[in-house]
Amino acid sequence: MRPTIDQLIQKYWDGESTLAEEKQLKDYFNSGAVDDAHMSLAPMFRYYRSESEITTDFVPDLSFTQESKPKVRYLIPKIMGIAASLLLLLTVTYQQLDMDDTSYNNKYTEVENPDEALAIAIEALGFLGTKYKKGTTPMSKGLKNLEKTDVFNFTKN
């Protein structure tokens, strides 16, 4: 059963028409044998036909859609490589300068007199003892507090 023009128009307005049914409507409205009840829709279908016949040689410029990589991304790895190279060069140069420094050889001299060497050793050990006691006092307080916890109590099961 072939649908009537009124049924095709209703399907068209509801958005349920197929391409073949829309072609049938276009052919009907462009044929010139349009019923008076449908004359109000004829200009719309003629407009569709006239618009579909328009041709142009315009070619849109789509170059903006192509990805162009920012130049900054190319610069960042190069700058990082240069910075790392300079840091490495400066570190090696600085260590070479430290190794060439012979001033540490002049700080210590040999003492040939045993009594003088003993006096220097006693003085150095006394200095070391005071600094050692001053440095270990806070640590020993912390250990005493730690010994009170159950961590070091090995007698309990």
Image (cartoon, rainbow, N blue to C red):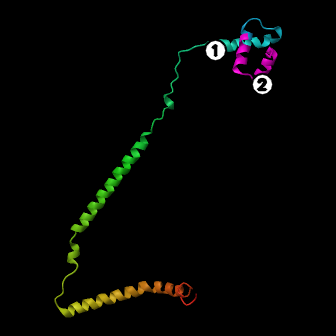
- Relative depth, front residue between 52 and 109: 52
Q: Residue furthest bottom?
A: 115
Q: Where is residue 90 drawn, in percent x and y?
A: 29, 58
Q: Residue drawn at (75%, 11%), measured in percent from left and top?
A: 42
Is residue 11 shown above or below 153? Answer: above
10 Å crowding of disc 1: few (<14), some (14-19), many (20+):
few
Is residue 74 shown above or below 148? Answer: above
Residues rendered magenta in the picture: 1-27
Tell us which disc is closer to us: 1 or 2: 2
Q: Quadrant of the N terminus?
A: top right
Q: Which residue is label 2 attached to?
A: 14
Q: Is residue 81 left or right of residue 113?
A: right
Q: Where is residue 4 drawn, in percent x and y?
A: 81, 15
Q: Is residue 128 left or right of residue 8?
A: left
* Main SS class of the magenta portion in the image: helix
> Considering the numbered disc 1 on the image, is that residue within a helix, a strand or a loop?
helix
- Relative depth, front residue between 157 and 86: 157
Q: Is residue 12 magenta?
A: yes
Determine which of the numbered discs, if any, sits on residue 52 in the image: 1
Q: CA distance from mark 1 to mark 2?
A: 23 Å
Q: Is residue 81 left or right of residue 66?
A: left
10 Å crowding of disc 2: few (<14), some (14-19), many (20+):
few
* Amino acid at pointer 1: Ser
> Considering the numbered disc 2 on the image, is that residue within a helix, a strand or a loop?
helix
Whether residue 79 is visible: yes
Q: Residue drawn at (22%, 80%), measured in percent from left and top?
A: 108
Q: Where is residue 154 drawn, in percent x and y?
A: 53, 88
Is residue 4 shown above or below 156? Answer: above
* Amino acid at pointer 2: Asp
Which mark sits nearer the N-terminus, 1 or 2?
2
